[in-house]
Image (cartoon, rainbow, N blue to C red):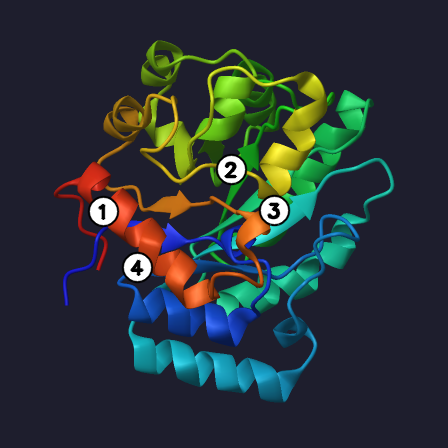
């Protein structure tokens, strides 16, 4: 079956685990989904499938039945007290699921040389699994606060299996533009995530927005179509649009279905699987 080149991102449905996320992605027509296999903070724990072998087998069986892909491993935080060796379990689990990429953030670490050392170590570990690392900048992060800061670190890593994760929310909130995005070598854009929002928001509301208060693509003021057009044609786009206010009121399946209905017309002829 032809599916639009979209991935259902786990932050979108924070109230479900890997098994249900795979089912929902399949039922709503997504080409892929991503999994939280490494905890970047206490607020985003790794899915139990990393440690529970029986649960992992069940998820693998479910994935095979669904016929969709695991796109991305979330999320490796290169914070000051991070131990890169602890990243191995998440990478190994992602490899077992056929993950193509893993995202990494920096929240927070003011020592750039330490960030660079941890990033290169993560890339080298991921290379053993055939996984690409994509560095994501974020508006609330002081350490990785813009596209150009992330791009400089990617280049300085001198690794071949590295690129950028571009989330339209953080591009807009950090003063980035679609024109600047178009200037980036497409080979460096390894991942992209889609949502929508108002053009202006208070700095105090940014963290809440990023974590759980985003708008459905096409229902805000972001240049969503232009963003999609600026991405490499072959890229599967992650839909990351959590709406915490709907949890407990609208089922996860229905939320995913509404997102697909909104996003599918925006991606047009892009086919992921």
Pointer 1 local density, CA inside 10 Å: few below 14, some 14–19, many at least 20:
some
Q: Residue furthest bottom?
A: 54
Q: CA distance from mark 2 to mark 3?
A: 34 Å
Q: Which residue corresponds to mark 3?
A: 124
In the image: residue 52, left or right of residue 1:
right
In the picture as drawn, the residue positioned furthest to the front comes out as: 249
Instruction: Please state which of residues 219 and 34 is positioned toward the viewer in this rendering.
Output: 219
Which quarter of the rendered picture does the C terminus lie within?
bottom left
Nearer to me, 272 or 100: 272
Q: How far across and down, in percent of the image, does residue 142 sit?
A: 74, 21
Pair 2/1: label in front: 2
- Residue 195 placement: quadrant: top left
Mark 4 against mark 2, which lies toward the viewer?
A: 2
Closer mark to the observer between disc 4 and disc 3: 4
Quick one: label 2 or label 1, which is nearer the N terminus? Answer: 2
Inter-mark Cα distance, 3 to 1? 36 Å
Secondary structure of the residue carrying numbered label 3: helix
- Looking at the image, do the residues carrying marks 1 and 4 touch, with CB atoms under 8 Å apart? no
- Which of marks 3 and 2 precedes in the sequence? 3
Label 3 Cα neighbours within 10 Å, binned few <14 / some 14-19 / many ≥20: some
Report which residue position mark 4 lands on: 30
Residue at 42% over, 57% down? 255
Residues at circles 3 and 1 in contact by the CB criterion of under 8 Å: no
Q: Give the residue furthest to the right.
A: 81
Q: Nearer the viewer, mark 3 or mark 1?
A: 1
Q: CA distance from mark 1 to mark 4?
A: 10 Å
Q: What is the number of the mark on residue 214?
A: 2
N-terminal of the two: label 4 or label 3? 4
Q: Is 122 left or right of 22, judged from the image as shown?
A: right
Q: Earlier in the sequence, mark 3 or mark 1?
A: 3
**Residue bearing mark 1:** 264
């Amino acid at each position: 079956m032809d599916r639009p080149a979209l991935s259902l991102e786990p932050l979108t449905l924070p109230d479900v685990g890997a098994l249900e996320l795979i089912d929902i992605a399949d039922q709503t027509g997504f080409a892929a989904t991503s999994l939280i296999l490494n905890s970047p903070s206490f607020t985003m724990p790794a899915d139990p499938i990393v440690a529970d072998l029986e649960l992992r087998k069940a998820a693998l069986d479910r994935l095979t039945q669904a016929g969709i892909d695991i796109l991305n491993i979330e999320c490796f935080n290169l914070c000051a007290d991070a131990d890169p060796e602890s990243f191995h379990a998440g990478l190994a689990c992602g490899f077992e699921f056929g993950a193509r990429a893993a995202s990494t953030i920096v929240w927070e670490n003011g020592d750039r040389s330490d960030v660079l050392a941890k990033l290169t170590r993560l890339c080298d570990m991921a290379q053993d699994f055939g996984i690409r690392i994509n560095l994501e900048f974020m508006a609330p992060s002081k350490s990785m606060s813009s596209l150009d800061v992330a791009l400089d670190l990617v280049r300085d890593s001198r690794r071949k299996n590295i690129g950028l994760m571009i989330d339209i929310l953080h591009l807009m909130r950090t003063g980035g533009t679609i024109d600047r995005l178009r200037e980036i070598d497409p080979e460096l854009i390894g991942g992209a995530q889609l949502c929508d929002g108002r053009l202006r928001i208070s700095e105090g509301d940014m963290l809440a927005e990023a974590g759980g208060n985003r708008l459905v693509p096409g229902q805000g003021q972001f240049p969503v179509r232009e963003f999609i057009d600026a991405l490499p044609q072959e890229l599967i786009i992650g839909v990351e649009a959590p709406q915490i206010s709907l949890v407990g009121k609208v089922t996860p399946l229905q939320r995913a279905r509404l997102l697909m209905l909104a996003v599918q017309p925006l991606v047009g002829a892009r086919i992921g699987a």
